Image (cartoon, grey):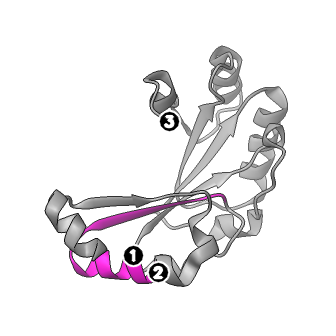
């Protein structure tokens, strides 16, 4: 039924996000497989606390690495499992988060693209300065959905 609804929309791209979609890994895997078989590109956004490798044959993964200011913790041992088709995302608020980002990048091989976004409302200038001063191999991005007022 979901596939029929996707066809009605005539889309070629679906992003599965949450909460944490991998709390229902078998259901998400079935959905991702079905969409992939229909030629629909699938992205899955995860908080980096659950193994995403069963989904990689059917979807690209965006692992949101939790920084200290979030009060949450990601499983950093998952980072080396990311492929060039995947992404790692760090949402940073302050210098402590930037230093954490730098330590993680120095400690774990990451073959995916790496994005850094400031927490909405944070001063992004010191974050950009930190990235440049430390020559971090990342892409800086703002949270456009927040700027536009989209939840």
**Magenta stretch: residue 134 in it?**
no
Looking at the image, which residue sits at the far front?
1
The answer to whether 35 appears left or right of 140 in the picture is left
Along the viewing direction, whichever of 29 and 54 lies nearer the viewer: 29
Along the viewing direction, whichever of 5 and 147 lies nearer the viewer: 5
Q: In this view, does 141 lie above or below 64?
A: above
Q: In this view, does 52 lie above or below 76?
A: below
| Comparing labels 1 and 3, the label whose residue is closer to the camera | 3
Q: Are marks 2 and 1 in contact (CB under 8 Å)?
A: yes
Q: Does residue 52 show up? A: no
Q: Distance between the residues labelled 1 and 3?
A: 24 Å
Residue found 76% across the figure and 34% down from its top: 98
Callout 2 environment at 10 Å: few (<14), some (14 to 19), or many (20+)?
Answer: many
Callout 1 environment at 10 Å: few (<14), some (14 to 19), or many (20+)?
Answer: many
Q: Tell me residue 64's x, y (percent).
A: 63, 52
Quickly name the residue at label 2.
29
Callout 3 environment at 10 Å: few (<14), some (14 to 19), or many (20+)?
Answer: few
**Magenta stretch: residue 30 in it?**
yes
The answer to whether 15 appears left or right of 140 in the picture is left
Residue found 75% across the figure and 69% down from its top: 77
Task: Report the span colored magenta.
Answer: 29-47
Residue found 81% across the figure and 55% down from its top: 73
| Comparing labels 2 and 3, the label whose residue is closer to the camera | 3
Element marked by disc 3: loop
Q: Tell me residue 26's x, y (percent).
A: 53, 84
Quickly name the residue at label 3.
151
Q: Distance between the residues labelled 2 and 1?
A: 5 Å
Quickly name the residue at label 1.
32
Q: Tell me residue 95's x, y (percent).
A: 81, 27
The answer to whether 23 appears left or right of 32 in the picture is right
Q: Quadrant of residue 4 in the image?
A: bottom left
């Amino acid at each position: 039924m979901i596939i029929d609804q996707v066809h009605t929309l005539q889309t070629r791209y679906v992003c599965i996000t949450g909460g944490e979609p991998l709390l229902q890994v078998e259901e998400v895997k079935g959905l991702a497989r079905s969409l992939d078989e229909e030629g629909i590109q699938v992205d899955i956004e995860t908080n980096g606390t659950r193994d995403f490798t069963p989904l990689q044959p059917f979807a690209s993964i965006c692992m949101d690495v939790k920084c200290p200011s979030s009060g949450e913790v990601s499983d950093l041992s998952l980072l080396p499992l990311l492929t060039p088709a995947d992404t790692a995302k760090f949402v940073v608020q302050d210098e402590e988060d930037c230093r954490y980002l730098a330590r993680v990048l120095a400690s774990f091989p990451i073959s995916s693209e790496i994005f850094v976004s400031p927490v909405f409302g944070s001063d992004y200038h010191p974050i950009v300065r930190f990235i440049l001063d430390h020559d971090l191999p990342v892409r800086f991005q703002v949270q456009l959905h927040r700027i536009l007022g989209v939840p």
